Amino acid sequence: MTLHDTYDPTNIFAKILRGEMPAVKVYEDDTALAFMDVFPQAEGHTLVIPKDVTARNLLDMPPEKLGPYMLAVQKIAQAVAAALTPDGLVVTQFNGAPAGQTVYHLHFHIIPRNEGVPLGRHGGGMADIGELEKLAGRIRAEL
Ligand code: 5GP
């Protein structure tokens, strides 16, 4: 998927939004859904996706929906930081496969980082769902 392709409504995040696939949810409002990344690059790796849009990436996002969505990204980043007290936090997103994107519904990654702990591989091993539920509970408690 390059920047020139079209939105595919069968992508995994669209399925999660429609309730067709499970996710360990952290937060949901009219604008955004946040859930745990099932192949986390660090403990607490959380994704925030916009609802009611067919935006593959940041460039596609309707401007009037971008502000409220980014407020949700900030809210979740603050909750992850409060819950897990990491030394640092990566907040990032990729646009198109050549840029590293693998799921083509806009999402921001929130990835806790700690001194001396290397970042896990992008698309690495699957997490234990019970552990993700515990982490999600700790993050939710800060919202
Ligand atoms: P991208 O590479 O597009 O920036 O990030 C996609 C992210 O989605 C990756 O970090 C990957 O681990 C995560 N991911 C892929 N499939 C699933 C899934 O079915 N459920 C969840 N929760 N995360 C997924």
Image (cartoon, rainbow, N blue to C red):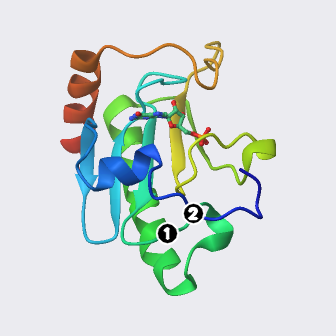
Kind of residue at badge 1: Thr
Determine if the C-beta at disc 1 is less than 8 A from ligand 1: no
Q: Residue at x 43, y 43 (%)?
A: 12
Q: Position of residue 103 (x, y in %)?
A: 56, 44
Q: Nearer the viewer, residue 142 or 108?
A: 108
Q: Residue at x 50, y 42 (%)?
A: 110
Q: Nearer the viewer, residue 62 or 73?
A: 62
Query: Residue 54 bears which disc, if any?
Result: 1
Q: Report which quarter residue 4 is drawn in.
A: bottom right
Q: Label 2: state its secondary structure.
A: loop
Q: Report which quarter residue 46 is drawn in.
A: top left
Q: Position of residue 114 (x, y in %)?
A: 56, 22
Kind of residue at badge 2: Tyr
Q: Position of residue 5 (x, y in %)?
A: 71, 61
Left or right: 31 with respect to 67? left
Q: Position of residue 2 (x, y in %)?
A: 77, 54
Q: Which residue does the numbered mark 2 point to in the structure image?
A: 7
Q: In the image, is residue 113 above or below residue 110? A: above
Distance, label 1 to label 2, CA atoms, is 6 Å
Q: In the image, is residue 134 above or below residue 88? A: above
Left or right: 78 with respect to 130? right
Cβ atoms under marks 1 and 2 closer than 8 Å: yes
